[in-house]
Image (spheres, rainbow, N blue to C red):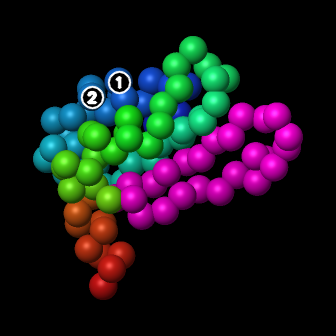
Amino acid sequence: LKIDVQGYAPEVLEGSINMIKENLIDVIEVELILSDLYEKSNNIYDIEKFLIPNNYKLIGQVKNISNIKINSPFSIDLVYGNKYIYEMLNK
């Protein structure tokens, strides 16, 4: 599941909560823009409050080198795996 919704990631996660609780989504990638670029902004807690209690763990990030520009919004894509993906990666 790739989430890139300009600040509305918590709403997408909340709408997907039944699938998240059942670990039906293997990997979730969430774009966070850590600035006031959009009407809504999120932080990592806004995402992890849905994922961590349901056995998803941070497994990586997608790097975006365009963030090097001065005064540009800083964004990061965080990648979470469900318990099965996390265990498989740690074997």
For image coordinates 82% across by 34% down, the residue present is 71
Q: From the top left corner, tell me how far across and down residue 58 is, in percent.
A: 39, 59
Region in magenta? 58-81
Residue 1 visible in rendering: no
- Relative placement, left or right, of 36 versus 86 is right
Amino acid at circle 2:
Glu
3D distance between C-alphas at marks 1 and 2: 5 Å
Determine the secondary structure under disc 1: helix
Give the residue furthest to the right.
70
Quarter of the picture holding the C terminus: bottom left
Residue 31 located left or right of residue 47: right
Q: Position of residue 25 (x, y in %)?
A: 28, 49
**In this rendering, would 49 be left or right of 70?**
left
Could one spot residue 68 in this view of the protein?
yes
Q: Quadrant of residue 89?
A: bottom left
Q: Seen in the image, is 58 located left or right of residue 50? A: right
The label shown at residue 14 is 2
Residue at coordinates 48% horizontally, 31% vertically from top-left? 42
Q: Residues within 10 Å of mark 1 (few under 14, many from 20)?
A: few
Rendered residue at 49%/62% (across/down): 60
Instruction: State the image coordinates of residue 51 (x, y, percent, origin top left).
Output: 28, 46
The extreme top residue here reads 39
Residue for badge 1: 11
**What residue do we see at 53% from left, 26% from top?**
41
Would you say the residues marked 1 and 2 are in contact, meaning their CB atoms lie under 8 Å apart?
yes
Tell me if residue 16 comes above or below residue 78 in the rendering.
above
Query: Residue 76: within the magenta?
Result: yes
User: Of residues 22 and 58, which is closer to you in this image?
Assistant: 58
Q: Is residue 61 magenta?
A: yes
What kind of residue is marked 1? Glu
Image disc number at residue 62 = none
